[in-house]
Image (cartoon, rainbow, N blue to C red):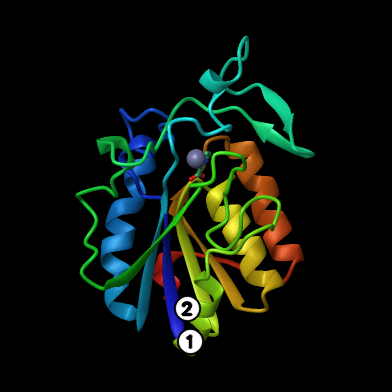
Amino acid sequence: MKALLLIDIQNDFLPGGALAVPEGDKVIPVANQLQSRFEVVVATQDWHPTNHKSFAKNHSGKKPFEKIDLDGLEQVLWPTHCVQGTPGAQLSAAINLNKAEAIFRKGTNPEIDSYSGFYDNGHRKTTALADYLRGKQVSQIYIMGLAGDYCVYYTAKDALELEFETFLIEDGTRAINPDDFEKAKADITNLGGQIIQSNQL
Ligand code: VGL
Ligand code: ZN
C-alpha cells in the first residue's frame, strides 16, 4: 500500500504566516490533485505549547534564527509559530483533507523540537505514525509539504531508517532555505530515497 504524507501545510508556514515558507502556497494544488491516487492519506501538524523551547521568545536575549544547544541537540530558534489552538496552527483551509483519515500532531513537548512526523529530534519518543502506517500495510511513503529543509527532510530520513520505500515529491515541497533543500535532497538520495515530481505519479 502507498501512503501520501502531507507535512505541516499550516497557515503559519504559508505566505503571511509567522514562519512563512517562500511560495509555500504552491504545494496546495499538488496536495489536492494527488490524494485520489493514494489508499492512505495522513497529515502532520506542528502543534506547540506557547512555552515551547524552540521559540526565540522563550530564551532571553535570543533572536529568531539564532542557534543554541538544547539538551545536547543543536536547535534553531524560531519565531513563535503553530501555537496550539491558534489560527496559525490550523491546516490550510485550502487543502482538501477529505481522504485524510488521521492527523499526527508533533512538537507538543515544550522541552524538545520535533521536525519529523515519526519522532522528536532526539528520537526520544515516537508519534506512533510508523505503527499506524504498518497497521495499514503501507510499505511505500510519498512525502510532500513544508518545509523541505526541515520537517519534510527529517520525515523522509526517518521513513528510510524505518525501512519504508520513500519518495519525496519535489514540486509538492517548498523550503525555508533553498540551499539547505539541495543538501537535504542529496542526503535523501544517498540514503536510498527517491526524489520525484508529482506528474510521475
Ligand atoms: C518546521 C521549523 C519549525 C517545519 C516546523 O514544519 O518544517 N520548521 N517547526
Ligand atoms: Zn515548529
- Give the CA distance from mark 2 to mark 1: 5 Å
* Nearer-the-camera pick, 86 or 9: 86
Q: Which residue is mark 1?
A: 135
Q: Is residue 29 above or below residue 22?
A: below
Image point (61%, 79%), residue name: 165
Where the C terminus falls, by quadrant? bottom left
Residue in the picture at 49% in, 30% down: 51
Up the image or down, 44 lies above or below 76; here it is below
- Element on which disc 1 rests: helix
Residue 110 in the image, given as x and y percentages of width and height: 54, 39
Towards the viewer: 183 or 7: 7
Q: In screen coordinates, is 134 left or right of 123? A: left
> Which corner quadrant of the image does residue 39 belong to?
bottom left
- How far from the left and from the top, in percent, is residue 177? 57, 35
Crowd tier of the residue under label 2, counting other residues whose Cα lies within 10 Å: few below 14, some 14–19, many 20 or above: few
Q: Report the front residue among 183 and 106.
A: 106
**Tag 2 near tag 1, CB within 8 Å:** yes
Name the residue: 45% across, 41% down: 48
Disc number placed over residue 132 in the picture, else none: 2
**Percent x, y for residue 157?**
66, 62
Residue at 34% from the left image edge and 45% from the top image edge: 10
Q: Secondary structure at mark 2?
A: helix
Question: In the rendering, at what x and y percent does residue 194 appear?
Answer: 62, 69
Say which quarter of the image contains residue 89: top left
Q: Is residue 80 above or below residue 113?
A: above
Q: Which mark is residue 174?
A: none
Name the amino acid, label 2.
Tyr
